[in-house]
Image (cartoon, grey):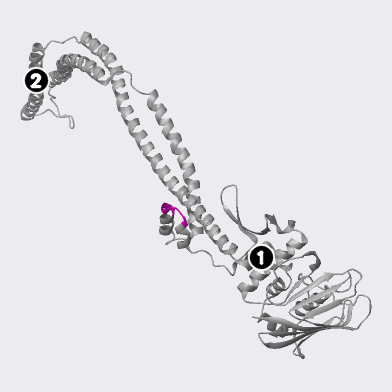
Amino acid sequence: MQIEFKSLKLQNFKSHQDLTVNFGERTVITGDNAKGKSTIPEAITWLLYGTDTLGSKLDPSPITYEADETMVSLLMDIDGTELLLGRELKKGKAKYYINEVPSKATDFNEMLGQYFNKSMFLSLFNPNYFFTLKWTEQREMILQYVSAPSNKEVFKELPEAQAKKLAELLKKHSLDDLEKIHRTNKNKLDKQYIAAQSRTKTLKEQLENNAPKVPLESLQAELSVLTKQRDEIEKVTDVAGDTNSRINIINSKIESLTIQIERGREQHAKVKNTQIEQNCYACGQELTEEAKAEALKSVDANAKAIARNVNPMIKERKALREELATLEYIDVSEQLEKARKLQEQINPIEQEINKYKHFEAMKEQLEEAQQAEKQILVSLNESIFIIDSIKDFRAKEAELQAKKVQDLFETLSINLFEELKNGEIKATFEIEMDGKGYSKLSLSESIRAGLELREVLSQQSNINVPVFVDNAESITKFKEPTGQLIMARVVAEQELKIVGDK
């Protein structure tokens, strides 16, 4: 889009009561200080946006005289079509005109927005305006014309292992999500790895401190001899124990039977000695002979019943006494003492052998701990590799994007990123000329820098608007921008003079 200024009319605008400026391809405004040179471009930005050329609010009120109203109109040519815009301020109230037709502010602003936004116009019109923006806005304005490097472009610049790993992972997750996943994983595994190392170290120390000192074969040989001797003694004591136990059981049974037999005999004698009553206990009459015979018969039956119970016990006691006569009590106290002493020798040997079992179990635990430590380390290294790959990806992506941006400029250097102490890449934006940041440039250098940047914005946006260069006397040589050029120069003791080349 080609935009040219044809003419500008100012009525009661700051120091100008009535001024008409006819623009040419190159318009030079000269005069001494305070003659209203800078007021001319300010009238244009006030008309369009109500600001000065740096985007700050502007009061257009007359300075050295009084007037009821202020009027600015600008005739422009936009791609061959003329457009006349006007803004009037009367008693604090603004009025807008499009081709002399009164318009609402919203319609006026909407019409401007169809051609360009405020920041773009001011950046193209005033080379100093761009540098008043926040660095984030500057960065955004430049990057909108440079496509970010594709993943494939970045992968080509990365080592094969990193490119292959990220290409696979990016099928499921974004780069930001991958970084969150593996940073979280790394933090978790860092703690697990420290704990695993500590456990492995502890088990190694325990293994060293509990290592058996006597060879297992020697212990087993000695144990075999001692257990054999003990077992031989236990065979004897076991047999003796059975015999002695049988003797004790028989004696106990004989004693129990004797008591029962004596009790039975006493009962039998008592029954035998029972006196038959001669008279009935109920009526007192003398019993008949028949009744007396029945009573004797009953007593005899009771005595025989008792004898039948006692006789088997007598026979059993006799048999037990006969068996007891065949048994002899064996004294094994000496053998038991020998067995006890042998066991005292066996116990420490078995403890030493058990140490071998415990030692083997600890070795297994150590192997498991070492394997767990190794697995954690593998997973940890995997996350570290991915995090580093992402870091390298972003660094290479930044490098490629910076190169694309840098290719737009001839003399300026553009810093889009900075590397932090931890190696991460942080977005930034700084323009340098000859190794110096914009804030450290001289006036002439800052003008040249602004003109080059303005030219890049114009080419990339395909918008060409007139450019205003203030303090042009401070710059002796520069590459003129495309489109109309408006320059203001200080000439001592000279009134305002405007010359527009056709």
Q: Image check: 398 left or right of 210?
A: right
- Whether residue 321 is visible here, answered yes or no, is yes
Residue under the point 82% across and 70% down: 489
Camera-nearest residue between 313 and 483: 483
| Crowd tier of the residue under label 1, counting other residues whose Cα lies within 10 Å: few below 14, some 14–19, many 20 or above | some
Q: Quadrant of residue 381?
A: top left
Amino acid tagged 2: Glu
The quadrant of the image that shows the C terminus is bottom right
The question of residue 160 being in magenta is answered with yes
459 in relation to 394, above or below: below
* Numbered badge on residue 432: none
- Residue carrying label 2: 316
* Nearest to N terminus: mark 2 or mark 1: 1
The quadrant of the image that shows the N terminus is bottom right
What element does badge 2 sit on?
A: helix
Residues in magenta?
A: 157-162
C-alpha distance separating marks 2 and 1: 123 Å
Residue 474 appears at what percent x and percent y? Answer: 80, 64
Mark 2 in CB contact with mark 1 (< 8 angstroms): no
* Numbered badge on residue 138: 1
Residue under the point 71% across and 66% down: 450
Residue 258 appears at what percent x and percent y? Answer: 15, 17
- Whether residue 109 is visible here, answered yes or no, is no
Q: Image check: 196 left or right of 47?
A: left
